[in-house]
Image (cartoon, rainbow, N blue to C red):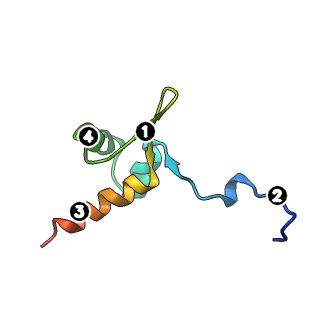
Amino acid sequence: MSRNEPITASQVAPMLYRVEEAAEVLRVGRTVVYELIRCGALRTVKVGTRRLVPVEAVRDYVDSLSDGAA
């Protein structure tokens, strides 16, 4: 890709996941993601009326799982 070519949306890594996408990345169901959100284990942000999960919040959640592993 040259410097003058425009960047398309498919070339940009997402910063926010929809709940369904977060579930897919974590390999769990949507219901599990909503429960993680409800109990405060998975941080979200609101954009308009949408509830989105920051990519960093998914990483933080996964890191917290390994912190508790023995």
Tell which circle, 1 or 4, labels the residue nearer the N-terminal end: 4
Q: Which mark is residue 56?
A: none
- Residue to which mark 3 is pinned: 65
Q: Residues within 10 Å of mark 1 (few under 14, many from 20)?
A: few
Comparing 24 with 6, the one in front is: 6
Q: Which residue is mark 4?
A: 35
SS class, disc 2: loop
Q: Residue at x 69, y 60 (%)?
A: 11
SS of the residue under disc 4: helix
Q: Disc 2 marks which amino acid? A: Pro
Q: Are marks 3 and 1 in contact (CB under 8 Å)?
A: no
Above or below residue 5? Residue 30 is above
Q: Residue at x 43, y 45 (%)?
A: 53
Q: Which residue is mark 2?
A: 6
Residue under the image location 49 percent in, 26 percent down: 49
The amino acid marked with disc number 3 is Leu
Spatial CA span between label 1 and label 2: 29 Å
